[in-house]
């Protein structure tokens, strides 16, 4: 039994990870699980640098999947699910990038600044070998949605939010 087998899965952390802006929870996730993901890359025969990239790509994949993730330990433990995401990352070779936000000051809106930022971001990712970029835009931000659509982004999933 390895140290990683003893990692507890806390429902409260998994619940908080649905909010990808919760930096503290994502840091806690990373601190808890990066070694598990990294060791899967090493066991797959990767060198240290490539195993570190698998950690990054797997974390991005988890970010994308968390809004739809339903934790049911009777069906599948979280660590098993994470292992499957890691294996899929290893198998597909997808390299993910995350475009967290594009903000254009009100005075500069309508002048094409958002399109230029999206263009530069796309070029930045391409130069680094990224094969898939995930961007998040608030559903009410129609100019932002249009700007990213013009840059080639397509809707991939919908995240719903409820506030009591």
Image (cartoon, rainbow, N blue to C red):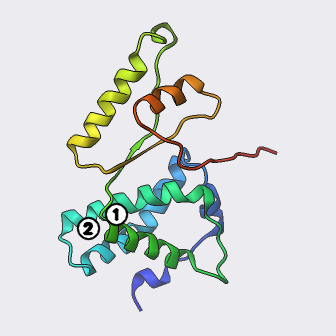
Q: Which residue is pictured at 49% across the width and 62% down the height?
A: 29
x and y, in percent, of residue 149 in the image: 47, 32
> Which numbered circle lies on residue 51?
2
Q: Residue placed farthest to the bottom in the image?
A: 1
x and y, in percent, of residue 8 in the image: 55, 76
- Relative height, residue 90 to residue 5 (above, below): above
Nearer to us in this view, 49 or 44: 44
Q: Which residue is pictured at 21% across the width and 78% down the height?
A: 45
Q: Are marks 2 and 1 in contact (CB under 8 Å)?
A: yes
Nearer to us in this view, 31 or 64: 64
Q: Residue placed farthest to the right in the image?
A: 164
Q: Mark 2 and mark 1: span between their CA atoms?
A: 6 Å
- Relative height, residue 32 to residue 109 (above, below): below
> Which numbered circle lies on residue 142?
none
- Relative height, residue 13 to residue 138 (above, below): below
Q: Residues within 10 Å of mark 2 (few under 14, many from 20)?
A: many
Q: Residue placed farthest to the top in the image?
A: 107
The secondary structure type at the circle numbered 1 is helix
Quarter occupied by residue 161: top right
| Residue highlighted by disc 1 | 55
Q: Which residue is pictured at 42% across the width and 21% down the height?
A: 114
x and y, in percent, of residue 96 in the image: 36, 52
Q: Count the labels in the image.
A: 2
The secondary structure type at the circle numbered 2 is helix
Instruction: Judge left or right: residue 45 versus residue 61.
Output: left
């Amino acid at each position: 039994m390895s140290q990683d087998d003893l990692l507890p899965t806390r429902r409260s952390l998994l619940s908080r990870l649905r909010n990808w802006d919760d930096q503290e929870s994502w840091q806690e996730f990373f601190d808890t699980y990066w070694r598990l993901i990294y060791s899967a890359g090493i066991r797959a025969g990767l060198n240290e640098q490539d195993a570190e990239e698998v950690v990054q790509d797997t974390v991005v994949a988890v970010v994308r999947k968390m809004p739809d993730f339903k934790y049911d330990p009777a069906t599948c433990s979280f660590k098993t699910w994470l292992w499957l995401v890691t294996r899929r990352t290893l198998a597909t070779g997808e390299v993910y990038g995350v475009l967290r936000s594009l903000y254009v000051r009100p005075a500069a809106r309508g002048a094409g600044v958002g399109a230029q930022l999206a263009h530069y971001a796309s070029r930045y990712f391409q130069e680094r070998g990224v094969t898939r970029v995930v961007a998040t835009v608030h559903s009410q931000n129609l100019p932002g949605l249009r700007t990213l659509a013009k840059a080639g982004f397509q809707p991939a999933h919908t995240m719903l939010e409820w506030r009591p």
